[in-house]
Every structure is written in structure tokens, then in C-alpha cells.
């Protein structure tokens, strides 16, 4: 393993820790599905760090989005 590869792994590890912190802070109601998705990314990181990094980007972006409810378009702001 080259030194440059190690730096990339450290960045991925840092980002995975950040994702873990964010998942841990979620309310219990919707946490299970999200936690399973996070664990699958961690498992992938062992075999294919580059692909895991791409999936982690998507995962973190989905955590940033507000939850989509079926009738959210019908509600007025503040409801």
C-alpha cells in the first residue's frame, strides 16, 4: 500500500465516523433502515474504498435532505 493510498483511507475513515455520528443522533423511528444502509457502506469500504466513498457521498446527501412525506406538497409552510 502506497502512502497516498493510506491518506485516502484516512479521509474515508474520517467521513465514515462523521456519518456514524449523524446516524446515531437520528430519532429511533427511522433509524434502523438508515443504520443498515450505513453498515453496508462500511462493509463495502473494506473491499472497494473508492466505490464506498461514492456511496457515502450519496448517503450523506440524503441525510441533509428534509424527510419527504407523502403529503408534503399539500402542506403550507409551518404546518
Image: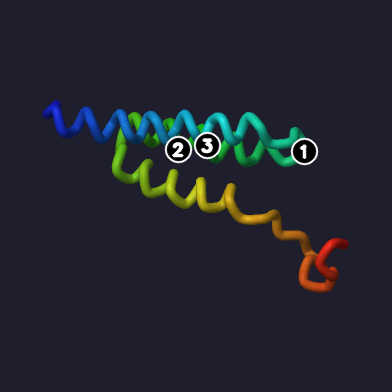
Which numbered marker is on residue 41?
A: 2
- The residue under the point 56% across, 30% down is 21
Place of residue 31 in the rendered image (x, y in percent of width and height, measured from the top left): 68, 37
- Position of 54 compared to 40: left or right? left
Q: Label 3 to label 1, Cα distance in Å?
A: 16 Å
- The residue under the point 72% across, 41% down is 30
Q: Dot 2: few (<14), some (14–19), or many (≥20) neighbours within 10 Å?
A: many
Question: Sequence order check: which comes first, mark 3 or mark 1?
Answer: 1
- The residue under the point 47% across, 52% down is 58
Disc 1 secondary structure class? helix
- The residue under the point 30% across, 29% down is 10
The residue at the far bottom in this view is 74
Which numbered marker is on residue 29?
A: 1
- Position of 58 compared to 9: left or right? right
Instruction: Give the camera-side residue of 16 and 41.
Output: 16
Mark 3 highlights which residue?
38
Place of residue 73 in the rendered image (x, y in percent of width and height, measured from the top left): 77, 72
Q: How many marks?
A: 3
Instruction: Give the camera-side residue of 4 and 1.
Output: 4
CB-based contact (under 8 Å), mark 2 and mark 1: no
- Position of 26 compared to 72: left or right? left
Place of residue 51 in the rendered image (x, y in percent of width and height, measured from the top left): 33, 45
Q: Label 2 to label 1, Cα distance in Å?
A: 21 Å
Place of residue 5 in the rendered image (x, y in percent of width and height, measured from the top left): 19, 33
Amino acid at each position: 500500500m502506497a502512502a497516498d493510498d493510506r491518506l485516502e483511507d484516512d479521509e474515508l475513515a474520517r467521513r465514515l465516523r462523521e456519518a456514524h455520528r449523524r446516524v446515531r443522533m437520528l430519532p429511533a423511528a427511522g433509524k434502523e433502515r438508515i443504520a443498515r444502509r450505513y453498515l453496508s457502506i462500511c462493509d463495502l469500504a473494506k473491499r472497494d474504498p473508492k466505490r464506498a466513498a461514492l456511496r457515502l457521498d450519496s448517503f450523506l446527501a440524503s441525510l441533509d435532505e428534509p424527510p419527504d412525506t407523502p403529503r408534503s406538497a399539500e402542506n403550507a409552510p409551518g404546518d
